[in-house]
Image: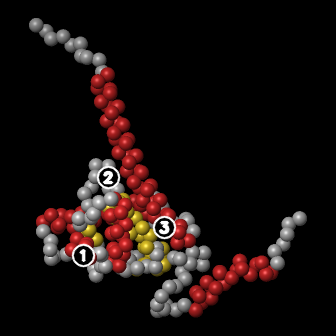
Amino acid sequence: MRKTKSRADLIPLFAQPLSLAFRVCDQRQNQRGRKVYSLHAPEVECIGKGNAHRPYELGVKVSVATTLNRSKGGQFIAHVKALPGNPYDGHTLAAVIREIEAQVGANLSRIVADRGHRGHNAPQSHQFKVYISGQRRRVDEAIKRELRRRAAVEPVIGHAKAERRLGRNFLKGAAGDAANAVLAAAGHNFRRLLEWLAALLCALIAALLLTAAPPSDHAIAA
């Protein structure tokens, strides 16, 4: 016989949705601080994009870092991290740079970021290693070429959003946001590795076919 739940047992089930609903009713348009944009995912934040066609989007900020020089296997994602709390872009470098160096096992000689990282809080040892798009001071010809290469991260982010589910997270909570970003980056890198291995396999098969081909029996007329 199925046991029915009492009213006292049902109260905790509706306590959190009701509190979120009350917060939605009380919040105002010009209110500062955290707001509730989704009852089933209260951790969702409103991120300003600054574009006329898309002034904002709902989700969580994610930091994506790639190498400046394109490798033979394609553009790999060197580091990715979810940044809850909708922080200012420049205030994320203090933690991100340390994690990148710990992950790749080498010190970063140069960091190229977009204009949203003005007024950054990079570590003291990296203050003069950060270059912003459109920067004019302390820029030589080599750095100008690298600043133009900064746009190479945009298609990587686009592929991760469209093909690796970085654009929409199906995992629950803030921990799900962090895990989804890491899984999307891993899927992107594995895709690059599979394409490189496929190209290597085709080259090996072509070389084996050339070596296994019988010699030509055409005679030279005297």
Identify which amino acid the numbered label 1 is placed on.
Gln
Q: Does residue 168 appear in the picture of this structure?
A: no
Q: Nearer the viewer, mark 2 or mark 3?
A: 3
The residue at the point 23 percent across, 13 percent down is 217
The answer to whether residue 138 is left or right of residue 151 is left
The answer to whether residue 129 is left or right of residue 167 is left
Front residue (pair 99, 118): 99
In primary-sequence order, the first of circles 1 and 3 is 1
Q: Which residue is mark 1?
A: 127
Q: Which residue is mark 3?
A: 178
Relative to 196, is 11 above or below?
A: below
In primary-sequence order, the first of circles 2 and 3 is 2
Query: Quick one: label 2, few (<14), some, or many (20+) residues within 10 Å?
Result: some
Give coordinates of residue 31: x percent, y percent.
48, 92
Relative to 70, is 84 above or below?
A: below
Colouring rule applied to residues = secondary structure
- CA gap, disc 1 and disc 2: 29 Å
Give coordinates of residue 192: x percent, y percent.
37, 50
Residue lying farthest to the right in this orientation: 1
Query: Where's the C terminus, which quadrant?
Result: top left
Front residue (pair 53, 70): 70
The answer to whether residue 192 is left or right of residue 60 is left
Front residue (pair 138, 218): 138
Identify which amino acid the numbered label 3 is placed on.
Ala
Q: Nearer the viewer, mark 1 or mark 3?
A: 1
Contact, CB < 8 Å: mark 1 with mark 2?
no
| Secondary structure found at label 2 | loop
Q: Which residue is mark 2?
A: 74
